Amino acid sequence: MVLIIQYNNLIFLPVDFGEKNFLKLAKMQKHSTTCKSQFIDLDDNPAEMACLLCDSMFLLPTNEQEFSKHLLEDHSLVIGDIDKIASLKSYIRYWKVRFRGQLLTTFCTTLKEDKPSSDGNQLKTDYYFLLSDCLAEDKALRDELYRAKLEYVCAVQVKERSDTSFKRGCMFCRTDFAGSRIEYLKHLTSKHNIIFGKLENLVFIDEYLNKLEECIENLTCIYCEGKFKDRLVLKEHMRKKLHKKVNPNNKVYDKFYVTSYYRTENRPTQNKVDVEVNEDLHEESEEEKSDDWETWETEYIKVRHCLFCNHTTDDFHAILDHMKLIHNFDLEDATQGRDYYDKVKIVNYIRCQMRESKCIYCEEVQTDCLSHMKEQNHFKLPIEKIWVFPEYFFPILENDEILGDLDTDSDEKIETELKNNISNIEI
């Protein structure tokens, strides 16, 4: 049986569009630089969208978590694997139309949860509704959105390759380029050693270049996002640290690589700057070598990152005060009497938990981890056996300046501990 889905008076069929067909699609689109689709909003540009079930407005996909929280708390509705939907805005438009005049049970799986009532004498039953690809119609919609998004991205990529109106000055040496984006990218690679990975994987190139240039103009490293005092210090940092590439773990850059649009289960491990980048890209060009770095003496600004949120400062005591005031967490008190290597483990344990949206005390995964920890008074360390593992010797955050601010009375002890425990870590 073939399932037919109607969307805004347009009819489409589910399509089996595997990754093997992506190159075939690219070849097919050589003669077409536009994407013809019944869907709108295939781009990732933020837009105000109405809720599926009410008139509340949300900026999507920017405020996806806020939107999901609203669905759960106000409508007891959960959208399964929402982060894997190729175009959330198009998905919302479709289901808003389908839900009109219908009960949620018509399309959703009903989940029942029994929990004690407020008086504790009897069980209270709550019902939740799951909208997921378990429903054939939903799966067909997701598959079609996936296919349409790939077509859209491919069309943009083909247009960028064929466009000859490109004009831009180099963000480093101010050489002017006109005609081909690829020639400018090759210049950045060969003359300035900026590593993009495979150039054929790039898409939305102008936006990508704008973002990189904004970082350079703001004296910010494109890899670690550290801020520096002047352009020369920034260049030296990027050269010495091999930070002339974006961080593969920074999801902000996902949209600029076509491999990011593959389904998660088929997506390559390195979806941005590829591992097989030639070693010679790490070598300095003659132009770079000619710069007089021997006179460089200035220290770059050491940025301290809060253990719990995105707040940063260049002062260690200021970041400690921030955590006390905002998060009610006293790092000095929590590590009082601990050796240096224990303090390192504690800092890295907290960073690891927050990266995975896990409470540092109860270890439960939370949608809004900080709110949970505040409400439950969980801004405190668990028992020692939770964070004492040797893998927490190794920094979770690259160039974590807080680790360098911890006392160094036990340097010899940490080296001994590392040697004794490194063999126990599974790599």
Image (cartoon, rainbow, N blue to C red):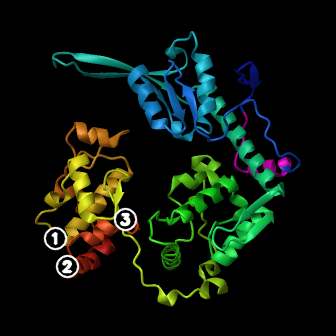
Does residue 44 show up?
yes
Residue designated by label 1? 339
Q: CA distance from mark 3 to mark 1?
A: 24 Å
Q: Which residues are magenta?
A: 15-29
Q: Nearer the viewer, residue 90 or 177?
A: 177
Q: Is residue 262 above or below residue 101?
A: below
**Which residue is most to the top?**
101
In this orientation, does residue 246 appear? no
Mark 3 is on which residue type?
A: Val
Contact between marks 2 and 1 (CB within 8 A): the answer is: yes
368 relative position to 388: left or right: right
Q: Residue 74 in the image: x percent, y percent? A: 40, 21
Q: Read off the residue under disc 3.
A: 303
Q: Residue at x 37, y 67 (%)?
A: 426
Reply yes or no: does residue 28 show up in magenta: yes
What label sits on residue 413 in the rendered view?
Answer: 2
